Amino acid sequence: MGTTKTGSFWLTTQVRTDTQGTPGQAVLDIGSLVDVPGQRGLSIEQVDFMAQIYDTATGNYVNSFTGTMTAGDNIQLDFQLSDQNPGTTLVSADNNSLIASGAILYNEPTNTVSVGTDFFPDEYGSKDDSFIVVNDSLYLVAVPVGIMTLAANHTIQTTVRVKAKSIKLSAKNWMALAITGLGSD
């Protein structure tokens, strides 16, 4: 769909949430990678999500929910990456601005972690199969739902890692993507 201008690189951002039902949002500024007059966009090849527990008192990270929640807790952590600003709400799976999404389920009594029913592809491949963005920001939303009481000084940190390339689009492809984005707005 376009001519590759750079090799693959990684972009990251994170959002911290500590109250069940209260979403958080982070904005990843990609304005320097997108250029309207130059018809340059961002070709997203892969998106990885990671959830960690962050101890605000010690500055330490834990890669497991074990020991950080009250006995009997049962939570679901939903997260999405989009190229239009949804505020702090999750968008519908049919929204053209949805790039990647997922959910983690954690059951404290049995100490089990599983994934939700979200099978949205988070690996697109390169160039022609990639998700192409012509907006100047990406938006990460994370929201924990269910029963959750974190230990003192603990928060859930949801991190997104985006593997991307800068590409130059034809005028026709640039306009098609811009119109698709307006249709989702």
Image (spheres, helix red, strand yellow):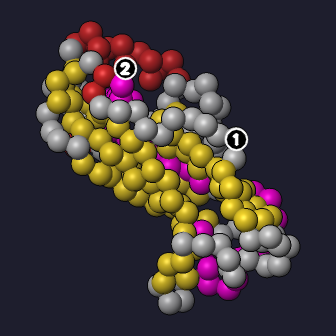
Is 104 magenta? The answer is no
As drawn, the residue found furthest toward the bottom would be 58
As drawn, the residue found furthest toward the top would be 172
* SS label for mark 1: loop
Q: Is residue 74 above or below residue 136?
A: below
Q: Which residue is mark 2?
A: 178
The magenta span reads 129-156
Q: Which residue is mark 1?
A: 117
* SS label for mark 2: helix
Q: Position of residue 85 (x, y in %)?
A: 50, 39
- For badge 1, the amino acid type reads Thr
- For badge 2, the amino acid type reads Ala
In the drawing, does residue 4 fall left or right of residue 182?
left
Q: Position of residue 152 (x, y in %)?
A: 68, 85
Callout in the foreground (2, 1): 1
Can residue 158 be seen in the rendering of this structure? yes
Please identify the dominant SS of the magenta region: strand
